[in-house]
Amino acid sequence: MPEGLDPLWNSSDKFYYAATFSKAASILDVKRAHIVAEALVNRRLYPGIQYSADLERSIKLISRE
């Protein structure tokens, strides 16, 4: 789990993070996988949030797999 975990995360968000991290780590390096997984959980919590173009490319890469 990321440091300074958002208190709005519930158990399903934590499971989603773990599953997304696992998938991302099979495609990206571990550090980037953590970033992408956290961004995707935040996107569930905060609809409409947008990230840098680079991070959005990584998110799309994970979403296509």
Image (cartoon, rainbow, N blue to C red):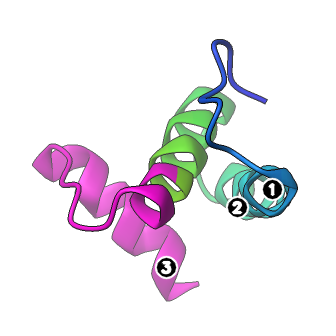
Q: In the rendered structure, which amino acid carries the disc numbered 2?
A: Thr
| Residue found at the far front of this picture | 8
Identity of the residue drawn at 87% across and 54% down = 11
Instruction: Tell me the distance, in whole angstroms, between the alpha carbons under discs 1 and 2.
Output: 5 Å
Q: Secondary structure at mark 2?
A: helix
Predominant secondary structure, magenta span: helix
Give residue 43's position: percent from left, percent from top: 40, 60
Q: Is residue 56 magenta?
A: yes
Horizontal side, residue 64 vs residue 55: left or right: right
Q: How many marks?
A: 3
For the C terminus, which image quadrant?
bottom right
Name the residue tied to disc 3: 63
Task: Tell me, yes or no, whether the two marked residues, 1 and 2, touch with CB atoms within 8 Å.
Answer: yes
Q: Which residues are magenta?
A: 42-65
Which residue is the site of mark 1? 22
**Residue receiving disc 2:** 20
CA–CA distance in space, label 3 to label 2: 9 Å
Residues under numbered marks 1 and 3 in contact, where contact means CB atoms less than 8 Å apart: no
Q: Where, by quadrant of the figure, is residue 12 drawn?
A: bottom right
Please state which amino acid type lies under the numbered disc 3.
Answer: Ser
